[in-house]
Amino acid sequence: MDPRLATIAVTALNATDNPGPGISVIRALREAPGFRGCLVGLAYDTMDPGAYAGDIVDDVFLLPYPSQGREALLQRIRYIHGRVGLDVIIPTLDSELDAFIDIEDELAAMGIGVFLPDKEHLQVRSKARLARLGDEADIAVPPTRMISDVAELYRLHQEIPFPVFMKGQYYGAHLARSVDEAVAAFHNIVAQWGVPVIAQSMVRGEEYDVVAVGDGRGGLVGAVPMKKISLTDKGKGWAGVAIKDPALIELTQRFMAATRWRGPCEVEVMKDEQGRYHLLEINPRFPAWTFLCAGAGMNLPWAVALLAMGIPVAPMHEYRVGTMFVRISIDQIADISQLQQLSATGELIGSPTLTLAAQEA
Amino acid sequence: MHSQPRLRDLAISDSGMVFDACTGAMFTINATGRAIVEGLKIGVGRAAMVAKLRDGFELSPDDDPARDLDEFLLLLRKATLIAHDFVLED
């Protein structure tokens, strides 16, 4: 089969000011040289903006939330596969990875490829185990403690001085400068993501992020480091630039070698004033700014799609340093019937983006 | 005389906008600063650099291109664009 004709599904079409990675990954796939296949968006909410981006997303299907379990997901994927014939699925949310890894064999039996880590490796890079990973990969990690009981916060300063970052298992980071702020952050995070909450020492410096893909054998398929140059009020990157820092690539290679990581990830690193690198997090999926790598000439989502189809990809080293991304908020035009259809049937097949001229016709 | 490796990764536009490819930092420099950076990139020595500034720019009697050069080198050192122990020799 010609991979350029493949039907590739990508999850997470949320594209607010704190966007999910789905649209960025879909845009990269759309830009793959010669790609003429079908791109299917898998959304969790009828108001996910990417569901109405008909210029880049061919078909849209709603997915059950991960909390509904593997059977609900598998049943839905079977239905979608019957409708459009999937070749590849690229999950892009932390919270859904467990479920997709769980059903990998069933997906393979249907002829649907994924390129994901196994559960053990997924846990190795979890925030809860990051310090151990740092030791194994010889990468500095800020002092970190798991907090399951709010009472522990009153003793935290004996081990980690304030300020600290309070982090959820999957998402969210709150800077706490005192016990009171830490307690408030703890309750906020527990309400969303449960325990444990991760308390991580704050490292002062410049943050850098790397989008990377591991081959599952300890090697690096490709990586593009990025420096954020504009942030939203939530601290999310609104603009960034591809940089050339061999030390960041080398750190990413050490992570891949230590974990034999399979699939995409985002490496978050802080460079302190002495020029030392501290690993803050490994996100086990593409970041929201993934389209930058395709723009810079290293299309990592396409590499993952090929690998998921069992097609080897040679390690990639070249990208255009200085390539920037700058986000934009736009008002997409849709017809209320699209929302009605997605709400009622859970799918939008071949739905075009509306132009004003098309509406008047 | 060796050029400083970090300086080789600087992209400088005609308008003096500088992009540090290693850190992503961006800043602007004036024509004098640009002359110094470009000189350092190709390994120009101190005496030749001072002469370049003296010949290439209109100076008033109070101007001291050697002092200006040292102050600019201090800025480059703070930005880690040249090594902490770098000395521009003749």
Image (cartoon, coloured by chain):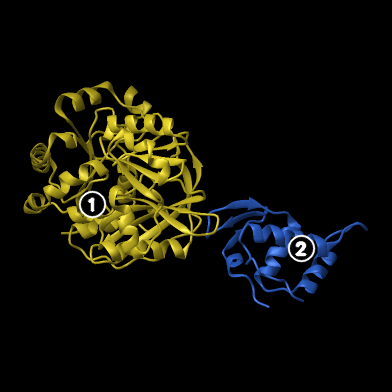
Q: Is residue A118 visible?
A: no
- Position of residue A281 relative to residue A221, above or below, is above
Residue at screen point 62% across, 67% down: B83
**Chain of the residue under the numbered disc 1 shown in the image:** A
Q: Residues within 10 Å of mark 1 (few under 14, many from 20)?
A: some
Depth order, front residue of A224/A88: A224
Q: Is residue B25 above or below residue B54?
A: above
Pick the quarter of the image with the C terminus of chain A: top left
Tell me residue A154's x, y (percent).
38, 36
Q: In terms of image quadrants, where is residue B50?
A: bottom right
Instruction: Indicate the chain coloured yellow by its letter.
Output: A
Q: Circle 2 marks a residue in which chain?
A: B
Left or right of B74 on screen, residue B7: left
Q: Amino acid at mark 2?
A: Asp
Q: Give the mark count.
A: 2
Gap between marks 2 and 1, in whole Å? 52 Å
SS category of the residue bearing label 1: helix
Give the residue pinned by disc 2: B70
* Chain B tint in image: blue
In terms of depth relative to the viewer, which is nearer, A103 or A47? A103
Mark 2–mark 1 CB contact (< 8 Å): no
